[in-house]
Amino acid sequence: MGFYLRCAIAKVDDGDVADRIVQAARALFPKFVKVRRFEFPFAGVIAGYDHNKAHDLVEDFAAHGYADEEAAYEDVAEGVDNRMGELSLAFPETPIAYVDVDCFGGTCMFSGYVVRDGLSTHSEPVSSSAHVRLFEHLGVHDPQWHFAPFTRGFMDTGVASDLARLPTTYYVHAQWDEPFRLAAMRASMLHAPWKVTIMTETSCVVVHEEDFFASLHPVDDQVEMRGKSFVDLTLTKTLAHELADDDVALELKDPDGKPL
């Protein structure tokens, strides 16, 4: 089974700006495009859809408000792509990437471009790591290949793959002085039910059953952790501190992204 997504992505650290982009995208893009905020591996907004699942609009175009099949087909094919310039002009200071994701048989290919203030500033041809270079042009420091929103179910739930069954309780962020390799090694040595699911030179993704999900990556000489919890506040802090040192300050947000 394949995974396909055509989407717009913006790196947005300001929660108020992120909310305004969400509102603008929902008003601008066709109704079948899903829009949501995300918190890791960086904070931002994504608006996307699987074009293969929207072809019923073409067959029943009148019921969906289209004048003819051609208009419906154009929206299905380019529902986000055709409106990138307009969204970019509404937020001229924020670079926005268009990414086409095509995964099948365990192989994923990506392509896309970046716009800012309505103008294209960078483009990437189809490759297995094009999204990483696009994220760099959004201002993401050392972007990782694994990107949670590019997993099945994320656009519906905001949670990657097998963590989609539980509601989010807290978002967790921390940064501390430690070589990344040492932090990743410590994570890999944690006792079950901790489990490292992805390990590369610059990324470590670790889960604690269905309670806690976190990604670690290096930032200069420090380690940054972005996590998502599905349990109460006390257990959230306990699990976060098992990955980080006990004296590391945790930045916690509620499910709406508001700091505690």
Image: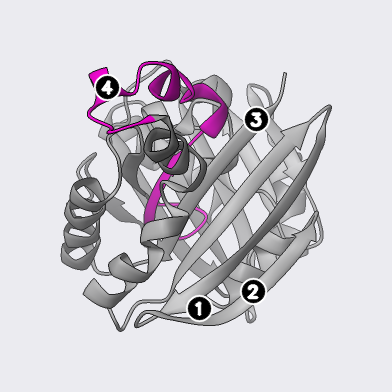
Instruction: From the image, tell me which residue sits under label 2.
Output: 123
Instruction: Pick the residue in front: 2 or 144.
Output: 2
Q: Position of residue 202 (x, y in %)?
A: 74, 63
Q: Position of residue 58 (x, y in %)?
A: 43, 24
- Which one is in front in this view, the residue at disc 4 or the one at disc 3? 4
For label 3, the crowd category at 10 Å Cα-Cα, with few meaning under 14, some 14 to 19 and many 20 or more, is: some
Instruction: From the image, tell me which residue sits under label 1.
Output: 139
Instruction: Pick the residue in front: 215 or 179.
Output: 215
Q: Position of residue 228 (x, y in %)?
A: 42, 40
Instruction: From the image, tell me which residue sits under label 4.
Output: 62
Q: Position of residue 73 (x, y in %)?
A: 46, 35
Instruction: From the image, tell me which residue sits under label 3.
Output: 3
Q: Amino acid at mark 1?
A: Gly
Q: In the image, 47: left or right of 226?
A: left
Quadrant for residue 21, please give it. bottom left
**In the rendered view, would you say 94 is above or below 239?**
below
**What's the magenta region?**
39-68
Q: Amino acid at mark 4?
A: Ala
User: For the N terminus, which image quadrant?
Assistant: top right
CA separation in Å, label 4 and label 3: 28 Å
CA separation in Å, label 2 and label 1: 15 Å
Residue plotted at (47% across, 56% down): 81
Instruction: Pick the residue in front: 31 or 137.
Output: 31
Quadrant for residue 88, please give it. bottom left
CA separation in Å, label 1 and label 3: 26 Å
Among numbered discs 4 and 1, the one appearing first in the sequence? 4
